[in-house]
Amino acid sequence: MAKDNATWLTVAIFVGGWAVFWLTGATSTKHLADNLVAAYLLAWGLYALLSTLPRKEIRARFVLMTLTGVVLLGTAELAGVVGLIDYQTLFGTPGREWFDRSGYVRDPELGYRRAAHHREQGAFVRGNIGEALCLPAHTPEPFDLRYDHRGFRNDRDMDQADVVVIGDSYVESPMLPGASLLTTRLSHRLGASVANLGISGYGPEQELIVLKRYALALQPKTIVWMFFEGNDLSQLDLEEQDATRIEDNRAAQDDYWMRSLTRNLLLLSRKVAQGCVSHPDYMRLRGRFQDAGGQTTTLYFWEKLAALKPTDRLRLDRLRAILTEAYELSRQRDIRLVVAFAPAKHRVHLGLDNFEPLTEEMRTWPVNELPHEVSSMLKELAPEIDFIDLTLPLREAAAQGVLTYLPDDTHWTTEGQRVAGEAIHQVLAGPPPRLARQ
């Protein structure tokens, strides 16, 4: 009886040890790896204490199993080292940087860009806010992303385009089918070739490089520069910086670690162990929208439009310098420059009769004067630069019950792309301003 009690006590101690490891959670992949190694050693310790086999036999089994595991893991890792398997792509795990993600490559000036002729098929089931809040998946909406030889979202390679649209994810829109994009709609409405040069995550610094490297080479008649207020201002450096973002001596090591089996198995295991962890802050930013058919939809919000700070004024100075250079490059080539202001979701819905804030924070959430600041800046810079504030057409559509923003995402719906594209078309279809010459 005493032996049985000792056995149960031993098991309880070891189970308690495992509980200490796992109930505290895994805060990082290193933490998870430590837990897995410790759990493995604990399991062998319990086996050694309870087994009646000779200690020599237990040691032999431990060494054999451990070496077998190491050899199997090493063999699988070798496939990643030589580039036969990219476990990050295989498991669909995230990377630290944009260039660590599937379909992206490093770029010494831009930091990252899409891989040439990359193609990605899938279904959009949850927006970026939905992911942060662990919202239920909605009806899958298939997409088929095709990129040209320069790594931009165009179905065919283009050596010349009448119109070029530069921007971030509002232009690329990887969650929507190609037929829905404002660049596609512009091409049909204008009866002209339109190149989409938008890349998710880019800011004005990178977009100026895109203009210099890619847009001018297409010899367009018009360049449309999309400025998204949600993050384009905050991405600006207060002073001009060296655009080189990659340390070459670490690139090969980082490349392997991103695609390695060990890293991606740990990330996958951590995701399974933790599940989806909701971000409570964003649950306070929501409201109820009623469409033209009387159906109500909960809209979730992300970007806060706080009053402009002194540092924002410095960033606006940097934006002026960037747009000045863009204008000069365009003017020298008789290219029409158009700046389109893409508003955050809250600016579009604030105060509409068919939108009801659901929290006190939403009811008291102010907006700033950024559209006016950008418009005034451009008038001072060069009156012939066209400025399109997309806030008004998007608000008018939303007031009529048109869902212009994805409910659980920060980006436009197909209808939002249509409204934005139509507003830009109305400007481009009109007579171009007379370019100033020196």
Image: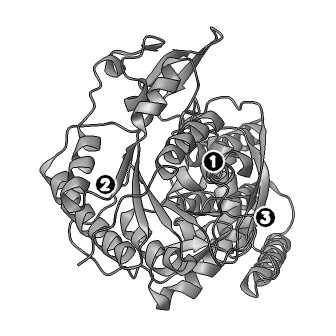
> In whole angstroms, how far apart are the C-alphas of marks 1 and 2?
45 Å
> Which quadrant of the rendered structure holds the C terminus?
bottom left
Which of disc 2 and disc 3 is earlier in sequence? 3
> In whole angstroms, how far apart are the C-alphas of marks 1 and 3?
30 Å
Q: Residue furthest left?
A: 310
- Residue 221 image point, x, y percent: 51, 68
Q: Secondary structure at mark 2?
A: loop
Residue at image mark 2: 234
> In whole angstroms, how far apart are the C-alphas of marks 3 and 2?
34 Å
Task: Name which residue lies at 43% across and 70% down.
Answer: 335
Q: Secondary structure at mark 1?
A: helix
Nearer the camera: disc 3 or disc 2: 2
Q: Are marks 3 and 2 in contact (CB under 8 Å)?
A: no
Viewer-closest of 139 and 343: 343
> Which quadrant of the rendered structure holds the N terminus?
top right
Nearer the camera: disc 1 or disc 2: 2
Task: Name which residue lies at 64% across and 80% down.
Answer: 256
- Residue 431 image point, x, y percent: 44, 54
Nearer the camera: disc 1 or disc 3: 3
Relative vertical location of residue 305 with respect to residue 153 in this rendering, above or below: above
Task: Name which residue lies at 25% across and 75% down.
Answer: 240
Residue at image mark 1: 18
Residue at image mark 3: 90
Amino acid at pointer 2: Ser
Which of disc 3 and disc 1 is earlier in sequence? 1
Viewer-closest of 258 and 170: 170
Relative vertical location of residue 188 with respect to residue 68 in this rendering, above or below: above
